[in-house]
Structures are given as structure tokens and as C-alpha cells.
Image (cartoon, rainbow, N blue to C red):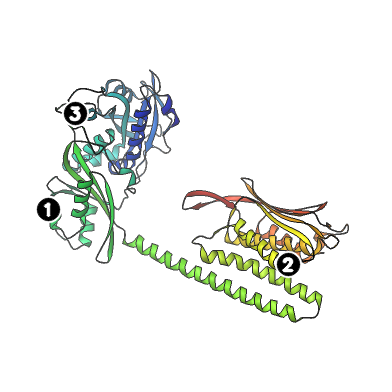
Amino acid sequence: MHEAVNYCLNLNEASIDFLRLIEAQMSIVADLSRADILLYARKSEQEAIALAHAQPHSLAHVYNKSREGYIITNKTRPEVMQTLLTGRHQKEYRSFIAEGAPVVRQALPVLYPPPLAAFSSAGETSEQPRVIAALIIVTNLIEHERHRLRSRVFQQALKRLQVMVSYGQVLGAEALTPFGEQDGIIFVDSLGMVQYASGIALNLYRRLGYKENIVKRRLADLDTADEEIRQTALTQNRCLERETKEGDRYWVRKALPLETYSPGRRPWSDSFKRGRLVGKEDGMIIAFHDATESRRQDQEIRVKNAMIQEVHHRVKNNLQTIAGLLRMQARRVKSEEARQILDETLNRILSIAVIHEFLSNENSNIINIKEVSHRIVAQFRQGMLNPEKEICLELVGEPIYLPARQATACSLIINELLQNAIEHGFEHKQKGFVRVNLADEGDQVIITVADNGDGLPSDFKLDQGDSLGFHIVKILVEEDLKGQLQLENGNGLAVTVKFPKILFRGEEGWKEHASL
């Protein structure tokens, strides 16, 4: 909801909470209405502002962009301002939107408190309802004409649903998944009789073996889960969504109970019942779709992920076996140079094995490089530090999530830089530190490995490949990470690796990771 809600006229904390409730219920109503729904409140005596905007998932949006925050006047949207000023329902006001398309608008007043809740149990007014907002339903003219050709039963049911959202009484709607183009719709009256079924709904029922028309049949007579969800929704007095398996197919159903309110009729003695306005139960809309194919695809993905994890697990085990063989070989060789080469190769293999271990335990290919770095540092503490010297290994910085390929490159880079610092940085010193620092700079990742050791010799030349370890690091940084390598040789050595970041889409939306 737009932040301007705190500065609109006639709104207090309670009425703002009520508008947020309506906003949460607008999405499914926009889907079923096949229309954009906007919530306007008065910003000043002459202006109103769109606080919320719900767009349908079942067809193209009326507006190309969200209208939240859009300001209108009596000149630009007279039907909205009239509803805000008079509290009257404005029906089928035809106009054009900025994109040039012809649309039909209707405006419903939003009152607070809702009319039926404004009276105490004694029948006396506790707070008079006042207009705090207007709910605007904007339908493409073509879609509006199509809707007029639909069953009158469904048209009336949809009108009741739209009135209910203006009362904030489509309880549970916020938990429903979006309505899609392949969803069928049926309307069941208060006696459980099917009074309307869309063409898609009839086709879906044929998959269940019902070749004849199900209209005018009792829902309880059908061998489906529809009646069960209807009864549950009536008992709980709220919208529900259920997934069931019938035969070899999976079905997802959404049940939306409808009520008819008569604000002009007394008494309003029991205004609230479990947080809901008491109205006349007037049937139910049930939307459903066949989710069999998507569930099978989900199952295939789960199986593939399990197989991939098993592969990573086996690769990790094989790498550790190879590392074990190299360790045995290193103990047997007499040449110190050969032993050093085997130890360096052993550490490179173990660094790669760490990545495969993480991939075998996680459901994602995104890896926390700080956790990997922690494992690598632990391996060096256990096997590489000279017990006769006091060298402290440190790891600082924040968690940084990288894709598997980049995490592998970074693990090798950190391994090589640690190995170089420990082996060559303290030949003439008995104690010191080696620090690995991880930094997320928003648009790039920075990894720094610094020590207070001897530093590089004055005649060291990186481009000429004087060190195999630095040569490996240079290739990984420039070729794999598309980044930059910087060396600062002074009081010890600091090696900095920088590489850019891009976006990837995860389960929680857009996140950042480094570019491949």
C-alpha cells in the first residue's frame, strides 16, 4: 500500500488497517473479475490518490504499470471523486485510459466502520459509517462485453464478491494462489446445487468422467472433493484452497463463500460473528484446475535434484579418496620438492571437494562462500601450519552467496593465496597472521588475503609466471570471474580480488550474485 495512506483525509489507524485488509483481498477478486482493481482515498479536498492496485493474472492488464501513487482530480476521474464525496455506487462509467484503450469503470464506496458493524448489540449506533475510500473496478471494454454475455447467475455472483471486498469480508482470500487462464469456475447456490459452470469447468469435469452437463446437479451427488471443500469453507466461514488427488490426477480447488448484505434492514443485533459481518449465505464460487502436469514436473525436478546431489556426494567422496592416496604418496617420497608439490595438489583437491560437499547437502546451486572459506581455513590449521611457528589464520567478513562455478573458483583462489602466504610469507619470521576478508560491495565482491610476512621479492613479476600459485589465481580471476587482481607489497602482502555481480532469481525473489 502506498505510503501516502498516512496523510489521506478521514483516515485513522483503525481505518488504515481496514484498507490494508481490503488490499490483501483484492488480488483474487481482480482475477475472477478479469479487471484491474484500484483503491483510492482522498488526499485533499480536490485530489485522491491510488493506495493499492491489483492486476489480474488471468489475462492482460488494463494498465501497463501499477497505478499505485497515481493522483486524480474531479476533472480527470469524476466518477471516483463522486463516490468519495457521496458514498454512492457509480456504475458502468465509460472512458479511455492513458494507454488509449476504452474501458468501463465502476466505483464502490468503502465505508468504515462497515455498515453492519456500526451498531452495537442494543441496536444503537456506536460510530456512524463514513466514506474512507473508493474501490474502482476497471475492465477492458472488450472483456466487459464478453462478461455481459455470460450467465446472469455468474454475473450476480461476481457482483456480490465485489461488494464483499469493499466490506473487507472476503476472509482468507490473501492465502489463495492466483486464478489462471486454465481454471474452471462453478457457482453453487446455498442448497449445494450447481447453477453455473464455465466451459473450462465442463471440460475439466469430463476428465473426471462426467460427460453430461453438471448444471442443476447437486454437488454432493458428484464423486469429487468439491462438496467437502464447500462444507469446510461454510463451517470456517472463509475462503479455502485445497489440493486433492482423484484417480491419477491432482486438482487444486479454491472456494469463495458469498454473502448478501442488506445495510438498510434492521436489526443489526449480532453485527460480528468470529470477525465476519453477518449476512445471508448466498452460495459459493469454486475455481479449480488440473495440476497434474505441474505436479509431475515438480516430481521430476525433485528426482533430478536428488540425482545431482548424489553425484556431488560421490564426486566429493572420490576426491577425498584421491586426496588420501596423495597423502600416502607424500609420506613415502624422499624429495622435499616432490612432497611439497604433492601437498599443494592435495590442498587444491580438498578445496574442490568442499564445494561438492556443500552441493551434496543443499537443494540449491547457490553457495555461501564464507562457509566454504571457513572449511578451507580449518583444513590449513589442521595440516599446513608449522607447529614451530605462531601463525594465526583469520576469516572475517559477511556471508556472500555465489553460484557453484564461481564458488569453486573462489575456493581455489583462497586456497592458493593461503598456501602461498603460509609457505613463502614467513620463511624469516616466527610468528604473524594471515587474514581472509570477504566483502559485499553491492555491485561487486571483494576478497582480500593479507599477511604481515616477508612480502614478495623485489624482482617478482606476476606476468612472467614466477609462481605457479599466483599464475593459477590470475587465470581464475580474469578468465572465470571476469575480475581484477591487485597485489600490494609492503609490510607483508595483500592480494585483492574484485569481480562484478549480477542478479539471479531465487525462491525469495531477486537476489544478487557474482557474474559468471
Residue at mark 1: 218
Which residue lies at the image location 27% right of the left edge and 40% below the top edge? 170
Please, what is the three-letter code of the amino acid marked with disc 1? Arg
Q: Which of disc 2 and disc 3 is earlier in sequence?
A: 3
Vertical side of 478 occupied by 108: above or below: above
Residue at mark 2: 384
Dividing the picture into quadrants, the one containing residue 467 is bottom right
Residue 125 % position (x, y): 22, 22
Q: Which of disc 2 and disc 1 is earlier in sequence?
A: 1
Q: Answer yes or no: do the residues labelled 3 and 1 have beta carbons within 8 Å? A: no
Q: CA distance from mark 1 to mark 2?
A: 77 Å
Return the mark for residue 121.
3
Return the mark for residue 391.
none
Dot 2: what SS?
Answer: loop
Q: Residues within 10 Å of mark 3 (few under 14, many from 20)?
A: some
Q: CA distance from mark 3 to mark 2?
A: 80 Å
Of the two numbered discs 3 and 1 in the rendering, the one whose residue sits closer to the viewer: 3
Dividing the picture into quadrants, the one containing residue 205 is bottom left
Please, what is the three-letter code of the amino acid marked with disc 2? Met
Q: Residues within 10 Å of mark 1 (few under 14, many from 20)?
A: some
Q: From this viewpoint, is residue 436 visible? A: yes
Q: Is residue 431 left or right of residue 54?
A: right
Which residue lies at the image location 42% right of the left edge and 37% below the top edge? 66
Q: CA distance from mark 3 to mark 1?
A: 37 Å
Please, what is the three-letter code of the amino acid marked with disc 3? Ser
**Quarter of the image with the C terminus in it:** bottom right
